[in-house]
Image (cartoon, grey):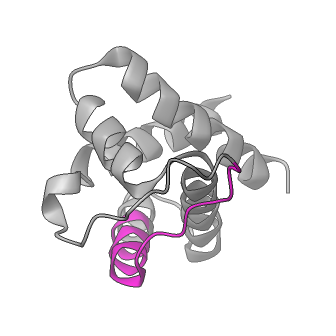
Amino acid sequence: MRTKLALLFIFSLILTIFTPVRLSVAEEVVDTNDLSKTPARYPQDYVREYLQDCIQTAKEEGLVEKDAQTLCNCTLDKFQQKYTLTEFKQLTAASQTDDRAATSLIEVGELCLETILFQ
């Protein structure tokens, strides 16, 4: 339980420092006529910076490299499956002041934490 709380803290810290304002990438165009929900793929620059920031923060908070990579890759994959880039940026920005938005993001982190805890 203590490990889970520590990892939750790490994930919430990552969300706090990784705000959409830090990155300036072109917004994706979403075809609203396409009703199939295929996973969104974020621009490579965005992905690279997200993973660098996430892994660095997770390691600074005590995760070993392998666990930090597992956590960050998992959260990125889940975010891309669940949110377009625009939605993710809006949700991340809103999470700074909106508990429901923060909870939505933390739920993704909790799913990914299970992959580390139960390996």
Query: Percent position (x, y) of residue 61?
Result: 40, 55
State how many labels appear. Answer: 0
Query: Does 93 lie within the magenta span?
Result: no
Residue furthest top as drawn:
99
Give me the residue at 63% from left, 54% from top: 81
Magenta stretch in the rendered image: 36-54
Q: Percent position (x, y) of residue 32? A: 50, 47
Is 84 left, or right, of 20 in this rendering? right
Camera-side residue of 44 and 56: 44
Q: Position of residue 30 (x, y in %)?
A: 45, 57
Quarter residue 47 falls in: bottom left
Give the residue at x 54% y 43%.
Answer: 7
Quarter of the image with the N terminus in it = top right
Q: Nearer the viewer, residue 34 or 37?
A: 34
Check the image and name the residue furthest to the front: 33
Q: Is residue 74 left or right of residue 114?
A: left
**Horizontal and vertical percent position of residue 36:** 71, 50
- Indicate left or right for 85 with 97 as reference: right
Q: Quadrant of residue 50?
A: bottom left
Q: Residue at point 59% right, 40% down?
A: 108
Does 114 appear above or below 99? below
Q: Which quadrant is home to the C terminus? A: bottom right
Above or below — where is 84 with respect to 92?
below
Between residue 60 and residue 44, name the one nearer to us: 44
Look at 48% across and 36% down and name the residue there.
105
